[in-house]
Image: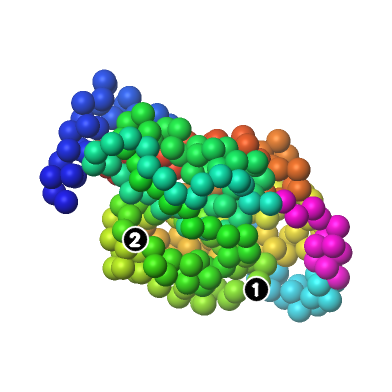
Amino acid sequence: MRSQRRARSQRLKRLPGGRQALPGGAGRDSRCGGALGSGLLGPNPTALRGDRGDGRGYLRAMRLADLALSPLYLAQALRFIARTERLPEAAGPREGQIGQGPGLRLLILGDSSGAGVGVAHQDQALVGQMLRHLAPVVPVQWQVIARSGATTARARRMLHGAGAFDIAVLALGVNDVLRQTSAHRFARQQAALMADLRARHGVQHILASAVPPFGGFTALPDPLRGYLHGRATRLDAVLRGVCAQAGACHVPFDLAPDMAWLARDGLHPGPALYAEWGQRMAGLALARLS
C-alpha cells in the first residue's frame, strides 16, 4: 500500500509546472473551500437572511409558515409530481478502470444526480466529467453507487458489499429535503455514513456536495419552492457542521442562476452543470493526492 502511494505521489510530482498544472485549478486549492462559480440555482443568500443577517429570522418564519401552509404544500407537490417528466438515469457502465498501475480508487455515492439523471450517458454525468480531468494525471479505478430517490439513510444501505476506495464523492440531500428528514436525523445519518466510509471502506478523503438550494428550481411552484428552499438551507448548514467534525470537505454550489445549467425537467443537472461539477470535484481530488 505504501509503495503504491509513493508511486502515485511521484506521478503527480512529475507533472509539468507541479500542482499549478493540474486541471480544474486543483493545484490552487489544496484545502477544502471555494465554490463552483460565483448562487447555484438559488436567489441571493442575503435576500433570505432577515434582520439578523445570519438566516435565522428567515428560517424561523419558514417553520411557522410550515404549519399554516402544509395542505397547500401537499396539493402543490402532488400536482407537480403528476405533471413533471421523469427522466431516466444515465446509461453506461457503473464501474471501470482507466490506466494501469497504482492510482486512485474513486467512489461516487448519491441520488439521481450521482446516477446521471439529466444526461444520456455516464460519460456526460458526474463520474464521466471527473474522469475527463483525472485520467490524464493518474490511473483511476471507479464505481458509481447511486439511485434516483436515494436518501442519506438509503445510500448507507447501498454501500453494503462495496470495496475499498481512496476518495468518496457524495451527492445527497435532495431526497432528505423532500422526505422531510429532520435536521437531527440528517446529521446523525450523515455522520454514520462518513464513519462507515472511513472504517469499512478505507476512504481517506470525502468530498460532500452541498444540498442544492431549491430556490433556483423555477419549475417548482411557489410557495412550495420557498418552503423547500428553507428546508434545504437548514440541512446544508447541518451538513457543513458534520463535515467539519468528520474531517470531510463540504463543497458549496455557487453558480449564477440560469436554466441553462438544468435538464429539461428544470430540476436535475444538465450537461453544462455536470461538466462544471465534475471539473471542480476532480480538482479537489487531485489536490488531496499530491
Secondary structure beneath dot 2 equals loop
For the residue carrying disc 2, how many other residues have a C-alpha within 10 Å: few (<14), some (14-19), or many (20+)?
A: few
- The CA span between labels 1 and 2 is 31 Å
Compared across the picture, whether 27 is left or right of 262 comes to left
Quadrant (top left/top right/bottom left/bottom right) for the C terminus: top left
Residue 270, x across and y down, in percent = 66, 40
Q: Where is residue 233 drawn, in percent x and y? A: 60, 61
80 falls in the magenta region: yes
Residue 188 point in image, percent of width and height: 45, 75
Q: Amino acid at mark 2?
A: Gly
Q: Residues within 10 Å of mark 1 (few under 14, many from 20)?
A: few
State the extent of the magenta-drawn residues as a range: 75-87
**Three-letter code, disc 1:** Gln
**What secondary structure is found at the residue carrying circle 1?**
loop
Q: Is residue 170 magenta?
A: no
Disc 1: which residue: 180
Which secondary structure dominates the residues rendered in magenta? helix
Residue annotated with mark 2 = 163
